[in-house]
Image (spheres, rainbow, N blue to C red):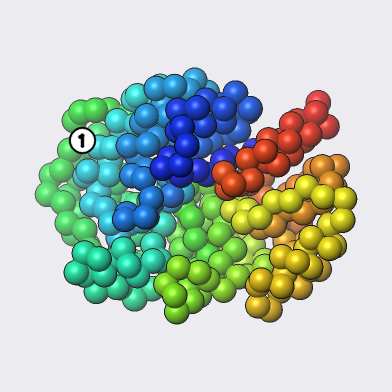
Amino acid sequence: MRISMVGDPGSGSWGEFARRCDADGFDALLVPDHPGSYTAPLVALAAAATVTERIRLGANVINAGMWEPLPLANELATLDLLSGGRAQFGIGAGHTPAEWLMQGRTYPSPGARVDRMIEVADATRRLLTGDPVTFDGAHVRLREAVLTRPRPIQQPIPLRIGGGGNRVLRYAARHADIISFSGTGRTLPDGHNHEVNWHRDQIDAQMDHVRAAAGDRDPDFEALVQYVEITDDAEAAATRFAAEIPGITASDLLVAPYVLIGTLPELVDELSRHEKRWGFRRFVIRAAYYDAAAQLLAAFQAKSG
Protein backbone atom coordinates (compact mmCIF):
# COMPACT_ATOMS: atom_id res chain seq x y z
CA MET A 1 0.00 0.00 0.00
CA ARG A 2 1.36 3.42 -0.98
CA ILE A 3 0.21 6.81 0.25
CA SER A 4 1.16 10.03 -1.53
CA MET A 5 0.73 13.65 -0.54
CA VAL A 6 -0.64 16.43 -2.75
CA GLY A 7 0.31 19.95 -1.66
CA ASP A 8 0.29 23.59 -2.69
CA PRO A 9 3.77 25.16 -2.62
CA GLY A 10 2.19 28.60 -2.21
CA SER A 11 1.50 28.01 1.48
CA GLY A 12 4.23 27.75 4.12
CA SER A 13 7.78 26.55 3.56
CA TRP A 14 7.79 24.29 0.52
CA GLY A 15 11.28 22.96 1.15
CA GLU A 16 10.39 22.01 4.72
CA PHE A 17 7.17 20.37 3.59
CA ALA A 18 8.94 18.35 0.89
CA ARG A 19 11.63 17.19 3.34
CA ARG A 20 8.96 16.17 5.84
CA CYS A 21 7.08 14.14 3.22
CA ASP A 22 10.33 12.43 2.28
CA ALA A 23 11.27 11.64 5.89
CA ASP A 24 7.79 10.41 6.85
CA GLY A 25 7.77 7.81 4.09
CA PHE A 26 5.17 9.10 1.64
CA ASP A 27 5.52 7.48 -1.76
CA ALA A 28 5.15 10.63 -3.88
CA LEU A 29 4.80 14.38 -3.55
CA LEU A 30 2.29 15.74 -6.05
CA VAL A 31 1.29 19.27 -7.09
CA PRO A 32 -1.95 20.33 -8.85
CA ASP A 33 -1.86 22.14 -12.18
CA HIS A 34 -4.27 25.09 -12.06
CA PRO A 35 -2.69 28.14 -13.73
CA GLY A 36 -3.81 31.36 -12.09
CA SER A 37 -4.67 29.77 -8.75
CA TYR A 38 -1.80 27.40 -7.88
CA THR A 39 1.98 27.40 -8.03
CA ALA A 40 3.51 26.13 -11.29
CA PRO A 41 3.78 22.39 -10.64
CA LEU A 42 6.97 21.38 -12.42
CA VAL A 43 8.91 24.38 -11.11
CA ALA A 44 7.80 23.53 -7.57
CA LEU A 45 8.67 19.87 -8.03
CA ALA A 46 12.14 20.74 -9.33
CA ALA A 47 12.69 22.77 -6.16
CA ALA A 48 11.50 19.80 -4.07
CA ALA A 49 13.93 17.54 -5.93
CA THR A 50 16.89 19.50 -4.56
CA VAL A 51 15.93 18.95 -0.90
CA THR A 52 14.68 15.34 -1.00
CA GLU A 53 16.32 11.98 -1.61
CA ARG A 54 13.73 9.26 -2.03
CA ILE A 55 10.22 10.53 -2.66
CA ARG A 56 8.80 10.48 -6.19
CA LEU A 57 7.65 13.77 -7.73
CA GLY A 58 4.79 14.49 -10.10
CA ALA A 59 1.83 16.65 -11.05
CA ASN A 60 -1.65 15.68 -9.95
CA VAL A 61 -2.30 16.21 -12.79
CA ILE A 62 -1.03 18.29 -15.73
CA ASN A 63 -3.93 20.02 -17.49
CA ALA A 64 -3.37 18.87 -21.08
CA GLY A 65 -5.27 21.88 -22.38
CA MET A 66 -2.57 24.23 -21.07
CA TRP A 67 0.51 22.48 -22.50
CA GLU A 68 2.23 21.55 -25.75
CA PRO A 69 4.16 18.25 -25.90
CA LEU A 70 7.69 19.56 -26.60
CA PRO A 71 7.96 21.98 -23.65
CA LEU A 72 6.17 19.48 -21.43
CA ALA A 73 8.59 16.70 -22.36
CA ASN A 74 11.49 19.10 -21.79
CA GLU A 75 10.28 19.95 -18.28
CA LEU A 76 9.58 16.33 -17.36
CA ALA A 77 13.02 15.24 -18.55
CA THR A 78 14.59 18.08 -16.56
CA LEU A 79 12.67 17.07 -13.43
CA ASP A 80 13.73 13.45 -13.85
CA LEU A 81 17.36 14.49 -14.28
CA LEU A 82 17.37 16.86 -11.28
CA SER A 83 15.67 14.29 -9.06
CA GLY A 84 17.91 11.39 -9.99
CA GLY A 85 15.12 9.49 -11.74
CA ARG A 86 12.15 10.20 -9.45
CA ALA A 87 9.76 12.02 -11.82
CA GLN A 88 6.23 10.88 -12.60
CA PHE A 89 4.26 12.08 -15.62
CA GLY A 90 0.75 12.90 -14.42
CA ILE A 91 -1.80 14.17 -16.94
CA GLY A 92 -5.54 14.76 -17.19
CA ALA A 93 -8.03 16.45 -19.50
CA GLY A 94 -8.59 19.54 -17.32
CA HIS A 95 -11.97 20.70 -16.10
CA THR A 96 -11.90 24.30 -14.80
CA PRO A 97 -13.44 26.72 -17.36
CA ALA A 98 -11.59 29.76 -16.02
CA GLU A 99 -8.24 28.31 -17.09
CA TRP A 100 -9.31 28.63 -20.71
CA LEU A 101 -11.48 31.74 -20.42
CA MET A 102 -8.77 33.83 -18.70
CA GLN A 103 -6.64 33.29 -21.82
CA GLY A 104 -9.40 34.39 -24.18
CA ARG A 105 -10.04 30.83 -25.30
CA THR A 106 -13.32 28.97 -25.62
CA TYR A 107 -13.86 26.29 -23.00
CA PRO A 108 -13.71 23.02 -24.97
CA SER A 109 -16.34 20.31 -24.80
CA PRO A 110 -15.57 17.25 -22.65
CA GLY A 111 -14.85 15.23 -25.80
CA ALA A 112 -12.44 17.83 -27.16
CA ARG A 113 -10.60 18.03 -23.83
CA VAL A 114 -10.16 14.26 -23.76
CA ASP A 115 -9.06 14.23 -27.42
CA ARG A 116 -6.35 16.76 -26.63
CA MET A 117 -5.25 14.92 -23.48
CA ILE A 118 -4.74 11.73 -25.46
CA GLU A 119 -2.75 13.51 -28.17
CA VAL A 120 -0.58 15.43 -25.68
CA ALA A 121 0.08 12.28 -23.64
CA ASP A 122 0.97 10.20 -26.70
CA ALA A 123 3.22 12.83 -28.26
CA THR A 124 4.98 13.66 -24.98
CA ARG A 125 5.71 10.03 -24.24
CA ARG A 126 7.17 9.56 -27.71
CA LEU A 127 9.37 12.65 -27.31
CA LEU A 128 10.71 11.34 -24.01
CA THR A 129 12.14 8.31 -25.82
CA GLY A 130 14.54 10.62 -27.68
CA ASP A 131 13.35 9.55 -31.12
CA PRO A 132 12.28 12.11 -33.76
CA VAL A 133 8.52 12.62 -33.63
CA THR A 134 6.20 13.75 -36.39
CA PHE A 135 2.63 13.96 -35.17
CA ASP A 136 -0.49 15.06 -37.03
CA GLY A 137 -3.46 15.26 -34.73
CA ALA A 138 -6.51 17.46 -34.39
CA HIS A 139 -4.82 19.30 -31.50
CA VAL A 140 -1.10 18.47 -31.65
CA ARG A 141 1.27 18.85 -34.59
CA LEU A 142 4.98 18.08 -34.52
CA ARG A 143 7.56 17.99 -37.31
CA GLU A 144 10.67 15.87 -36.67
CA ALA A 145 10.68 17.12 -33.08
CA VAL A 146 13.50 15.68 -30.96
CA LEU A 147 14.24 16.02 -27.26
CA THR A 148 18.03 15.87 -27.52
CA ARG A 149 18.73 17.51 -24.18
CA PRO A 150 18.08 16.89 -21.37
CA ARG A 151 17.59 13.15 -21.41
CA PRO A 152 15.52 11.60 -18.61
CA ILE A 153 17.07 8.94 -16.42
CA GLN A 154 13.95 6.75 -16.37
CA GLN A 155 12.91 4.96 -19.54
CA PRO A 156 10.02 5.41 -19.44
CA ILE A 157 8.95 7.96 -16.86
CA PRO A 158 5.93 6.37 -15.11
CA LEU A 159 2.61 7.65 -16.47
CA ARG A 160 -0.20 8.66 -14.09
CA ILE A 161 -3.56 9.51 -15.68
CA GLY A 162 -6.18 11.16 -13.51
CA GLY A 163 -9.89 11.56 -14.06
CA GLY A 164 -13.34 10.09 -13.69
CA GLY A 165 -14.86 9.93 -17.15
CA ASN A 166 -15.17 6.60 -18.91
CA ARG A 167 -13.13 7.57 -21.96
CA VAL A 168 -10.23 8.94 -19.90
CA LEU A 169 -10.27 5.79 -17.79
CA ARG A 170 -10.34 3.52 -20.86
CA TYR A 171 -7.26 5.27 -22.24
CA ALA A 172 -5.60 5.05 -18.84
CA ALA A 173 -6.38 1.34 -18.61
CA ARG A 174 -4.48 0.76 -21.86
CA HIS A 175 -1.51 3.04 -21.27
CA ALA A 176 -1.02 4.28 -17.70
CA ASP A 177 1.18 2.84 -14.98
CA ILE A 178 -1.04 4.52 -12.37
CA ILE A 179 -4.75 5.27 -12.83
CA SER A 180 -5.74 8.01 -10.40
CA PHE A 181 -9.49 7.87 -9.78
CA SER A 182 -10.86 11.25 -8.74
CA GLY A 183 -14.28 9.99 -7.67
CA THR A 184 -15.83 13.00 -9.36
CA GLY A 185 -18.51 13.30 -11.98
CA ARG A 186 -20.04 16.22 -13.87
CA THR A 187 -18.58 19.68 -13.23
CA LEU A 188 -21.11 21.90 -11.45
CA PRO A 189 -22.14 25.35 -12.76
CA ASP A 190 -19.55 27.12 -10.56
CA GLY A 191 -16.86 25.58 -12.79
CA HIS A 192 -14.85 24.22 -9.85
CA ASN A 193 -16.90 21.73 -7.84
CA HIS A 194 -18.27 18.41 -9.06
CA GLU A 195 -20.87 15.81 -8.53
CA VAL A 196 -19.36 12.80 -6.78
CA ASN A 197 -19.47 9.13 -7.72
CA TRP A 198 -19.03 7.71 -4.24
CA HIS A 199 -21.84 5.16 -4.13
CA ARG A 200 -20.58 1.60 -3.94
CA ASP A 201 -22.42 0.52 -7.09
CA GLN A 202 -20.94 3.46 -9.02
CA ILE A 203 -17.42 2.48 -7.94
CA ASP A 204 -18.07 -1.18 -8.77
CA ALA A 205 -19.25 -0.24 -12.27
CA GLN A 206 -16.25 2.02 -12.84
CA MET A 207 -13.77 -0.65 -11.76
CA ASP A 208 -15.44 -3.24 -14.01
CA HIS A 209 -15.25 -0.81 -16.93
CA VAL A 210 -11.54 -0.14 -16.39
CA ARG A 211 -10.59 -3.78 -15.90
CA ALA A 212 -12.38 -4.74 -19.09
CA ALA A 213 -10.43 -2.07 -20.98
CA ALA A 214 -7.11 -3.05 -19.36
CA GLY A 215 -7.22 -6.65 -20.55
CA ASP A 216 -3.97 -8.35 -19.51
CA ARG A 217 -2.44 -5.11 -18.18
CA ASP A 218 -2.26 -4.56 -14.41
CA PRO A 219 -1.90 -0.82 -13.74
CA ASP A 220 -1.95 0.47 -10.18
CA PHE A 221 -5.29 1.91 -9.04
CA GLU A 222 -5.09 5.08 -6.96
CA ALA A 223 -7.85 6.98 -5.12
CA LEU A 224 -7.77 10.73 -4.53
CA VAL A 225 -8.89 11.06 -0.90
CA GLN A 226 -10.92 14.21 -0.29
CA TYR A 227 -11.32 14.06 3.48
CA VAL A 228 -9.60 12.34 6.41
CA GLU A 229 -10.64 12.34 10.06
CA ILE A 230 -9.27 10.15 12.82
CA THR A 231 -12.08 9.73 15.32
CA ASP A 232 -13.66 7.12 17.59
CA ASP A 233 -17.13 8.16 16.39
CA ALA A 234 -16.97 7.57 12.66
CA GLU A 235 -20.73 7.60 12.17
CA ALA A 236 -21.16 11.06 13.72
CA ALA A 237 -18.24 12.50 11.72
CA ALA A 238 -19.52 10.96 8.49
CA THR A 239 -23.01 12.31 9.16
CA ARG A 240 -21.61 15.84 9.52
CA PHE A 241 -19.60 15.56 6.31
CA ALA A 242 -22.43 13.93 4.35
CA ALA A 243 -24.64 16.94 5.10
CA GLU A 244 -22.36 18.99 2.82
CA ILE A 245 -22.68 16.64 -0.18
CA PRO A 246 -26.00 16.29 -2.00
CA GLY A 247 -27.15 12.72 -2.55
CA ILE A 248 -24.58 11.14 -0.23
CA THR A 249 -25.27 9.42 3.08
CA ALA A 250 -22.99 8.70 6.02
CA SER A 251 -23.12 5.02 5.07
CA ASP A 252 -21.86 5.88 1.57
CA LEU A 253 -18.92 7.78 3.02
CA LEU A 254 -17.91 5.01 5.37
CA VAL A 255 -17.37 2.54 2.52
CA ALA A 256 -16.01 4.90 -0.17
CA PRO A 257 -12.24 5.02 -0.84
CA TYR A 258 -12.39 8.80 -1.33
CA VAL A 259 -13.11 9.53 2.36
CA LEU A 260 -11.30 8.05 5.36
CA ILE A 261 -13.07 8.41 8.72
CA GLY A 262 -12.50 6.28 11.83
CA THR A 263 -9.89 5.16 14.34
CA LEU A 264 -6.41 4.31 13.09
CA PRO A 265 -7.00 0.53 13.33
CA GLU A 266 -10.32 0.94 11.50
CA LEU A 267 -8.68 2.95 8.74
CA VAL A 268 -5.83 0.48 8.31
CA ASP A 269 -8.44 -2.26 7.86
CA GLU A 270 -10.42 -0.03 5.52
CA LEU A 271 -7.43 0.47 3.22
CA SER A 272 -7.04 -3.29 3.01
CA ARG A 273 -10.75 -3.68 2.19
CA HIS A 274 -10.47 -1.10 -0.60
CA GLU A 275 -7.58 -3.06 -2.08
CA LYS A 276 -9.44 -6.36 -1.83
CA ARG A 277 -12.73 -5.09 -3.29
CA TRP A 278 -11.57 -2.57 -5.87
CA GLY A 279 -7.82 -3.02 -6.27
CA PHE A 280 -6.75 0.32 -4.80
CA ARG A 281 -3.07 -0.04 -3.91
CA ARG A 282 -2.41 3.71 -3.76
CA PHE A 283 -4.03 6.67 -2.06
CA VAL A 284 -3.38 10.39 -2.53
CA ILE A 285 -4.20 12.62 0.44
CA ARG A 286 -4.38 16.41 0.54
CA ALA A 287 -1.89 18.41 2.60
CA ALA A 288 -4.67 19.74 4.84
CA TYR A 289 -4.81 16.25 6.35
CA TYR A 290 -1.07 15.73 6.60
CA ASP A 291 -0.90 14.77 10.28
CA ALA A 292 -3.70 12.23 9.95
CA ALA A 293 -2.15 10.82 6.78
CA ALA A 294 1.26 10.45 8.44
CA GLN A 295 -0.32 8.64 11.40
CA LEU A 296 -2.23 6.35 9.06
CA LEU A 297 0.87 5.57 7.00
CA ALA A 298 2.87 4.75 10.13
CA ALA A 299 0.06 2.55 11.48
CA PHE A 300 -0.25 0.66 8.18
CA GLN A 301 3.50 0.12 7.96
CA ALA A 302 3.62 -1.12 11.57
CA LYS A 303 0.85 -3.64 10.91
CA SER A 304 2.43 -4.76 7.64
CA GLY A 305 5.65 -5.61 9.34
- Give residue 145's quadrant in the image: top left
Q: Type of residue at label 1?
A: Leu
Is residue 54 placed above or below 113 in the rendered structure?
Answer: above
| Between 282 and 168, the one nearer to me in the picture | 282
Let me know if residue 19 appears in the view: yes
| Between 163 and 291, the one nearer to me in the picture | 291
Q: Is residue 19 left or right of residue 202?
A: left
Which residue is at 33% across, 44% downward? 40
Is residue 102 placed above or below 5 in the rendered structure?
Answer: below
Residue 164 in the image, given as x and y percentages of width and height: 53, 65
| Between 296 and 138, the one nearer to me in the picture | 296
How many numbered markers are drawn? 1
Residue 181 in the image, given as x and y percentages of width and height: 57, 57
| Between 295 and 25, the one nearer to me in the picture | 295
Which quadrant does the N terminus fall into?
A: top right
Instruction: Provide the secondary structure element on which disc 1 rests.
Output: loop
Which residue is at 36% across, 31% downward? 46
User: How dense is the environment of label 1, judged by Cα within 10 Å: few (below 14), some, or many (20 and up)?
Assistant: many
- Give residue 293's quadrant in the image: top right
Which residue is at 32% across, 37% downward? 43
Q: Is residue 214 left or right of residue 108?
A: right
Is residue 171 placed above or below 178 in the rendered structure?
Answer: below
Residue 194 in the image, given as x and y percentages of width and height: 53, 71
Which quadrant does the C terminus fall into?
A: top right
Let me know if residue 269 appears in the view: no
Residue 142 in the image, given as x and y percentages of width and height: 16, 51
Residue under label 1, please give it. 147
Which residue is at 42% across, 72% downward? 191
Q: Is residue 287 left or right of residue 59?
A: right
Q: Residue furthest front?
A: 12
